[in-house]
Amino acid sequence: MRLRLTPRNASFFDQLAESAAFLVVGAELLSELLGAPPAGRKEIASRLRDAEHGADEATHTIMRNLNQTFVTPFDRDDIYRLASGLDDCMDAMEEAGDMVVLYGVDTLPDLVITQVDVLRRCAELTADAMPRLRTMKNLAEYWVEINRLENEGDRTYRRLVAAMFNDGMDPIELMKLKYVVDTLEAAADAFEKVANLVETIALKES
């Protein structure tokens, strides 16, 4: 651990944890939306949008803090990238839920639910990991498991897309569903990017 001669603003740890907590809420709402009857999805999408707005404000708080703080607990650019990465995770989940409603995707294959189950687990692990940045301890199991989950998500995505093209779906419905599953895959990728950044930060601080 590098020797530090100046005080550090520890509020970043709490703010990053708050930002990650929104991911758990977002993933739960996305799961609820996909499991709801089509008529009930619009209201859940509205709640998901509210959660995304809350996550945006948490990100803005971190950015304002960065602009006002001279000494940060770890590299300033890494804090910026981490806050932005958490925001990307939430944005992708909200976008997927919004697409389901806007495109009127009534029937969702079971593998879409499997995709969201991966996102829910990623969100829980990420929210659990953020407070541990304070000590940089016991984080390896987090990024290893996120990488495993992302690989699982990749396999699910490939199976799902293959089934969509092989099952003779209506072309318009296929396009709608493809947009949704692509965005869910992007959300899983965003979680992996956050985990990879945490690994980089931990190595720098060791």
Image (tube, helix red, strand yellow):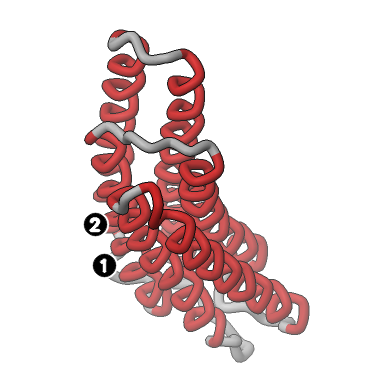
Identify which residue, 53 or 81, lies in the foreground: 53
Mark 1 → mark 2, Cα distance in angstroms: 7 Å
Q: Position of residue 89 (x, y in %)?
A: 49, 53
Identify which residue, 34 or 140, lies in the foreground: 34
Q: Position of residue 84 (x, y in %)?
A: 61, 58
Element type at marker 2? helix
Element type at marker 1? loop
Q: Residue furthest bottom?
A: 7
Amino acid type for the residue under numbered disc 1: Asn
Left or right: residue 77 compared with residue 160: right
Q: Where is mark 1, residue-wise?
A: 138
Where is 174 relative to 81, above or below?
A: above
Residue shown at the point (37%, 71%) measured from the top left: 136
Q: Position of residue 147 (x, y in %)?
A: 31, 43
Quarter of the image with the N terminus in it: bottom left
Question: Which disc number belongs to residue 204?
Answer: none
Quarter of the image with the C terminus in it: bottom left
Question: Which disc number belongs to residue 141?
Answer: 2
Q: Position of residue 157 (x, y in %)?
A: 33, 28
